[in-house]
Amino acid sequence: MYNPRFDKKTFKKEVKNNVKSLYRKTVEEATPQQLFQAVSFAVKEAIIDDWIATQNQYKKDDPKIVYYMSMEFLMGRALGNNLINMTAYKEVQEALDEMGIDLNAIEDEEPDAALGNGGLGRLAACFLDSLASLGYAAYGCGIRYKYGMFKQKIEDGYQVETPDNWLKDGNPFELRREEYAKEVRFGGNIRVEYDVTTGKTHFVQENYESVMAIPYDMPIVGYGNHVVNTLRIWDAKAIVDFQLESFDRGDYHKAVEQENLAKTIVEVLYPNDNHYAGKELRLKQQYFFVSASIQAAVAKYKKTHSDLHKLPEKVTFQMNDTHPTVAVAELMRILLDEENMEWDEAWEITTKTCAYTNHTIMSEALEKWPIDLFSRLLPRVYQIIQEIDRRFVIKIREMYPGNEEKVRKMAILYNNQVRMAHLAIVGGFSVNGVARLHTEILKQQELRDFYEMMPSKFNNKTNGITQRRFLKHGNPLLADWVTEKLGTEDWVTNLSLMEGLKPLAEDTKALAEFMDIKYKNKERLAKYILEHNGVSVDPRSIFDVQVKRLHEYKRQLLNILHVMYLYNQIKEHPEMSFYPRTFIFGAKASAGYIRAKEIIKLINSVADVVNNDRSINGKLKVVFIEDYRVSNAEIIFAAADVSEQISTASKEASGTGNMKFMLNGAPTLGTMDGANVEIVEEVGIENAFIFGLSSDEVINYENNGGYNPVEIYNNDPDIHRVVDQLIDGTYSNGDTEMYRDLYNSLLKAQGGARADMYFILKDFRAYADAQKRVEEAYKDTEGWAKKALLNTACCGKFTSDRTIQEYVDDIWHLDKVKVEPIIDQTSQY
Ligand code: GPU
């Protein structure tokens, strides 16, 4: 066991002592929040030893480091996860029990660290967990937003956003590292100096505004290996003294401006998922954390290495989508202006150090900054991008003489815009997609020209998730059962062992146990729903779950239209056999995404009507879970029977929720999109419910102007009826306008958008049929249990440990590190 040094007595003493010194209270007097703080500080105390040991080991071994650059880290709660990874969860639970403290209740006091929107941010969090658990040196680099993802309230069926003040009680796990502060400069102008003696040109930024970036470090605990890596997130503060002492003495106005800049820059996470809004402050955020992180990484490298030309041997900057791709130009700037390198040597280093991951093909997500905004905010960085572009365009012309179409399509600067994806592809050595299908679409469609020009840069890294949080922590009943059945807990770090469960699909007793655990988890979720939504749901009904960001391409609208259809069926044929179903939704809509908000309102309206209709005998329930986030996701995945993954084929790059459902034994009801394709490949098509257009068919329609939904509407009376119910007042107390926009979106081309852009009516019948197959399959209790169990048994591929190992083998080439723990008498682990 990992923690032979855990001593209950010392731990309990420490908790008591923390309550006393932090709050001048006894354990009995302390509030739950105070107990959470006291326990967390005791846990941090133990983590610190391993954190020091790890960093010392890194100093000794000098391994290559990956810097995972991301605007988002959707970490969720830290306490329970840290205990799990220290392999101390049960011991600490017991110790606290003996003090009359319930660990679960204490965990519920911790706010989620919601520094991300959805899949992209959660992937970053899973990756950090896997990097530490596999023993690789890594930093997560991001922003310490004062306000994370907004909290969602549902009022009268509408989403209402409230600020997420996650730091208000203090964050016990973070460390402020003032001594590693870095200055970041914005705006002003560039003065060009020519040095006659050296013949060198210098570029001097003047009249700029600047902020100080202050790092906060959060420990990332590896599982059972004493490795503790660092998530470094940057706070901003004004540099007032500096300005008043220098040439700007007495420039009160500027001091105030800088104060404001510092305050606003880290104020809040932009709540957009898969969407580029073009806000200047967002670009400031991007450059702010990228510049600080790269400065810090270069400074760290220089402490122990003399030759910057070998930087690529020790450092990779992995850019999580285009959000941090200004990194390419910033590294160039540092090498050129601060290290006085020539262009070619700086370029050689940069293009061996930077790598880019693409997470979407949705065109509205492409970051294309207007040149006037970009060059005003980052004048020197912009000059460098101009030069990168100039040289790249020469290359295009060399390769494709006379083909100006290629230049138009591939240039970085075009149409008065800076195309960030192009910068990343040209300036990096690797471009990867996040599921096999997605990478193929990138190569054959969106990035085809780049693939043709530089095929060797392109590679696939199918996403993954961490089983430590989403099984061991989130579903302890199933986790213990798996351990018992496999006779080992090694699946926690080697998920391929799950295939050892496959024979149990033929074992009636094991199947019953498996479904009994599912039932208990459904009871736990039902309790949560009753407490948080005031709706009572029957754990014997089928829990059909769609939880993810609200987006038209994810097609929550298809799901709820189908519920409306089922409701019509039940009303019309009360005698018809119908297995009771509970449709569970959870989703945040970006604050400015009107149509997404209409869909939330519709779901809640349908819930209102259906849940209150006594005549259907509770056969159908609809629940919208408020404030879907990492912490309640853990409960939701564990309780799901059916995993809804119904995006329009080609649109969902990968999906990762799909993997979390699979891990917890919920078969996929989905399209052949993203990683669903690979899930089906692992589990077998007979253990999933697949329907709808293929990505090729969708792309084909799109290239030929779409399809005609009106024809379907006119020819299918069930569909006709459901669509009409959007405007006949059925779900709006007689209001015929409330859902008119949704109605129009399905039937009418408007404002450049095709009618039914996401093929909802086109796929409706296929979806309804697939749902019918779900119902039939569920009625066969043992048959269903088999499918469910096989999903868990076949999920091995989808651990982020596998994903990270592939990144290491193909892109990062990191060295594995072994950490020997510090044995310290005063420490309790
Ligand atoms: N994704 Br781009 C986001 O969550 N937010 C974004 O802004 C962009 C992509 C998601 C993809 O939609 C999802 O398919 C994928 O699994 C996830 O990134 C992680 O790669």
Image (cartoon, grey):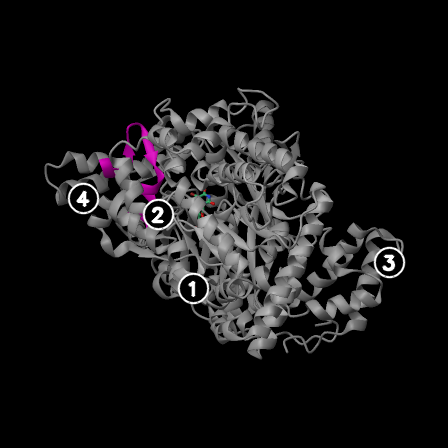
Return the x and y of residue 342 as percentages of the image width and height: 29, 48
Can you give x and y, in whole percent of width and height, for residue 713 in the image?
A: 39, 30
Q: Mark 4 or mark 1, which has the lower sequence index?
A: 4
* Foreground of the two, 509 or 417: 509
Which residue bears the numbered disc 4? 395
- Mark closest to the chain's N terminus, 3 or 2: 3
Crowding at mark 2 (Cα within 10 Å: few <14, some 14-19, many 20+): some
User: Residue at 49% of width from left, 41% of height from top?
Assistant: 559
What is the secondary structure assignment of the residue under circle 3? loop
- Tally of numbered discs: 4
Marks 3, 4: nearer the viewer = 3
The reply, left or right, for residue 11 in relation to residue 459 is: right
Residue 740 in sight:
yes
> Which is nearer the eye, 354 or 516?
516
Query: Which residue is nearer to you in this view: 462 or 69?
Result: 462
Quarter of the image with the N terminus is bottom right
- Earlier-in-chain disc, 3 versus 4: 3
